[in-house]
């Protein structure tokens, strides 16, 4: 199976979409997680809200995954 240059660039773009979402999620969760642990140490009853705020950035990975799937569908790799 041979892959032309356009298809290869699209595959790299799909990988970058997932990488960008994962990196953004990691940066966001690092900041939110440390602040959330400080909040829970002072007010343990706020655990639910801290957990919710920690989970929200996970949508970035989902968005990156969806974009990658759309790119790969567009060039016919899936």
Image (spheres, grey):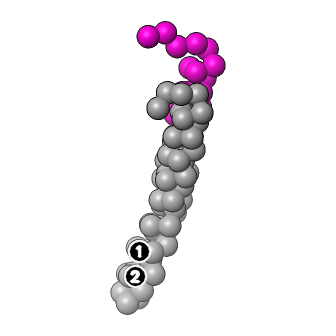
Q: Is residue 46 above or below residue 67?
A: below
The x, y position of residue 25, in whole percent, is 51, 54
Q: CA distance from mark 2 to mark 1?
A: 5 Å
Q: Which mark is residue 51?
A: 1
- Whether residues under marks 2 and 1 lie with C-beta atoms below 8 angstroms apart, the answer is yes
Residue 6 appears in the figure? yes
Q: Nearer the viewer, residue 69 or 34?
A: 69
Residue furthest right as drawn: 6
Image quarter in which the N terminus is found: top left
The x, y position of residue 27, in whole percent, is 53, 54
Q: Nearer the viewer, residue 33 or 58?
A: 58
Q: Magenta: predominant secondary structure element?
A: helix
The x, y position of residue 39, in whole percent, is 45, 80
In the rendered structure, does residue 8 fall within the stretch colored magenta?
A: yes
Which residues are the magenta region? Answer: 1-15
Q: Is residue 42 left or right of residue 10?
A: left
Residue plotted at (58% across, 13% down) = 4
Q: Is residue 36 above or below residue 1?
A: below
Q: Is residue 3 above or below residue 42?
A: above
Q: Is residue 9 above or below residue 56?
A: above
Q: Secondary structure at mark 1?
A: helix
Residue plotted at (50% across, 46% down) = 65
Q: Which residue is mark 2?
A: 48
The x, y position of residue 38, in whole percent, is 44, 76
């Amino acid at each position: 199976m041979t892959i032309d240059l356009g298809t290869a660039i699209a595959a790299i773009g799909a990988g970058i979409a997932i990488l960008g979402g994962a990196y953004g999620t990691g940066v966001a969760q690092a900041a939110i997680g440390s602040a959330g642990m400080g909040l829970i140490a002072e007010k343990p009853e706020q655990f639910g809200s801290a957990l919710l705020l920690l989970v929200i950035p996970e949508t970035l990975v989902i968005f990156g995954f969806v974009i990658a799937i759309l790119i790969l569908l567009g060039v016919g790799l899936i």
